Image (cartoon, grey):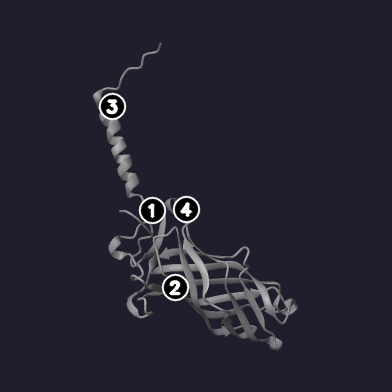
Amino acid sequence: MRLTKAPGSAAIAAMGLIATVGASTASALPHELSGFCSKNEPLLCAAANRIDPPAGGSMLISAHSELDEFKNSGFFSTPEKCKVNAAISVKETDKKAIPSEIQELTFTQCSGPCQKIEAKGPPWKGELSMPTPLLGGTWRFFTREGGALHNECTFGTTCEYGTDPVNGTTLTGSDTASGAVIKATNVTLKYKSGSGEFFCGPTGTWNAEFKATSIHLRNGAGEDVGLHAPWWFSLLGEA
């Protein structure tokens, strides 16, 4: 039989200290819950800086892209360029994936093959999350809905493109010193309807960079009761 020497009091104290430090460190880690912050605190937003919907109300989260670029795979080789405003409605946070709806997508000052672009049928459901929060990384906005009609194009053509309902569309988010940023990077959109795939192409490639502008807090009656500008993505949890 092999005898094992029992640990001394110093070793026992050391093990106790390690266990205590380990437990306190674990409790300090953020929960894997996503949210919004009025300060640039991406890993853990202080309670005083959290932006939450009013009870029974919602938040309208706005962002703006100075250069939204779309290039189809059809007859036209010149990319379409516009400025775009986006507004996303959120009714709850404290979720691993925050349910949301794209309420508004407006295109202005367009140049290229088409003179006018308009969103088709919002609101579109989506969700915001950080898939690997404790490892860092980027935020993810995902939706299986959404599309836009390109009007007043060359030769009088029209082309509607939209999200593939099977694979969906993914945009990535990150925080900068001046606020959150959401990017569409070489996102593929599918031809839906219009003057045919010869002119429109079966797909198109979308690139855009949306910068945070404001978050409007709204009560249950839809009235504005607060404003935050700008805003940042953040994890929520215990400090």
- Total number of numbered discs in the rendering: 4
Rendering coords of residue 79 (x, y %): 63, 77
Residue depth check, mark 2 versus mark 4: number of the one nearer the observer = 2
Tag 4 near tag 1, CB within 8 Å:
no
Q: Residues within 10 Å of mark 4 (few under 14, many from 20)?
A: few
In the image, what residue type sits under mark 4? Thr
In the image, what residue type sits under mark 1? His
Rendering coords of residue 125 (x, y %): 52, 70
Of residue 164 and residue 182, the one placed in the foreground of this image is 164
> Of label 2 and label 4, which has the lower sequence position?
2
Q: Is residue 134 left or right of residue 55?
A: right
Q: Residue furthest right?
A: 198
What residue is drawn where x is 33% and y is 76%?
227
Give the residue number, with chain letter if any, for mark 2: 89
In the image, what residue type sits under mark 3? Ala
Q: Residues within 10 Å of mark 1 (few under 14, many from 20)?
A: some
> Of label 2 and label 3, which has the lower sequence position?
3
Compute the Cα span from label 1 to label 3: 33 Å
Vertical arrangement, residue 85 with respect to residue 23, above or below: below
Compute the Cα span from label 2 to label 3: 56 Å
> Of label 1 and label 2, which has the lower sequence position?
1
Tag 1 near tag 2, CB within 8 Å:
no
Residue depth check, mark 4 versus mark 1: number of the one nearer the observer = 1
Q: Which mark is residue 126?
A: none
Compute the Cα span from label 4 to label 3: 36 Å
Of residue 124 and residue 9, the one placed in the foreground of this image is 124
